[in-house]
Amino acid sequence: MDNSDRKTVLVTGSSRGIGRGIALEMAGRGFNVAVNYSGNKEAAAETLALCRERAQSEDQVFKAFQADISIREHRTRLLQEVIEGFGDFHGLINNAGVAPKERLDLLEMGEESFDRLMTINLKGAFFLTQEVSRYWLSKDSFRKDFRSIVFVTSVSSEMISINRGEYCIAKTGLSMSAKLFARRLAAENIGVYEIRPGIIQTDMTGGVKDKYDKLISDGLVPQRRWGFPDDIGRAAASLVQGDFAYSTGSVIHVDGGLHIPEL
């Protein structure tokens, strides 16, 4: 594949965890990757190095871009820098997100934590998607190429945790955002999807590993194992490369069967 024809994907929050898993899978499938990070420059550099190791070709391009997507000016700068760095891009993966700093009972949760998660996990992804969509639709020449937007949400979109209610509410809002953009962009050759991960082994779940080790062993997850960032990466890559071009609005569960209702 000539690099002029090589497609580029922007992955937010891809310095580590699920985002890094997605970036590596995209690199392994021949994509250029724009790695976005908020504050951990060293981790972003590690992701770039790992992408180069996984690359299919020496002419693939991997670049890191610092931006806090919860800030409007950062979102605008990120889009401009990605366009300048790659000329164009064909996929946006909304992965950036944070967990509450403390897991508190619903009756103890504070407004500061609520606002933080709404701003980063929901508002940032929504308005970045809006800005990217406007840019793509402003270029008539882009409409001939299939483009994709993926929202990485969580089983917490539909499964409650009363000691991190703000996280559940933000992810539920993100799920609705995916539906809204899927409908709005359906006629524009832009597919919009939701990937709903289950219990994934990352830094975010490190503090509750022992708890979930036992729950998984006891059968909470039908496939009886943790999920890994690579599991999410494979799903995301299939969506971005157009394998499900006629499935816009779909929710892809990557949770080992956790979402299956059971008595």
Image (cartoon, rainbow, N blue to C red):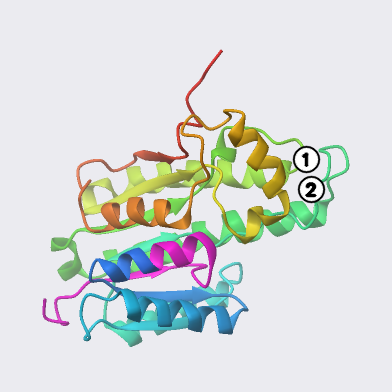
Q: Quadrant of residue 81?
A: bottom left
Residue 96 in the image: above or below residue 220: below
Query: Which residues are the magenta region?
Result: 1-23
**Is tag 2's residue or tag 1's residue first in the polypeptide sequence?**
2
The residue closer to the viewer here, 226 or 117, is 226
Image-based side of 213 in relation to 3, left or right: right
Circles 2 and 1: CB distance less than 8 Å? yes
The residue closer to the viewer here, 196 or 262, is 262
| Amino acid tagged 2 | Arg
Q: Which residue is mark 1?
A: 163
Residue 136, position as x, y percentages in the image: 29, 66
Residue 166, position as x, y percentages in the image: 71, 46
Q: Quadrant of residue 161?
A: top right
Secondary structure of the residue carrying tag 2 is: loop
Asked whether the viewer can see residue 66, the reply is no
The C terminus: image quadrant:
top right
Q: Report crowding for label 2: few under 14, some 14 to 19, many 20 or more residues within 10 A (C-alpha).
A: some
Residue 153 is labelled as none
Residue 73 in the image: above or below residue 235: below
Asked whether the viewer can see residue 57, the reply is yes
Q: Which residue is mark 2?
A: 103
Residue at the image position 73 percent from the left and 56 percent from the top? 115
Q: Quadrant of residue 58?
A: bottom left
Residue at the image position 53 percent from the left and 68 percent from the top? 16
Q: Report crowding for label 1: few under 14, some 14 to 19, many 20 or more residues within 10 A (C-alpha).
A: some
Residue 91, position as x, y percentages in the image: 31, 64
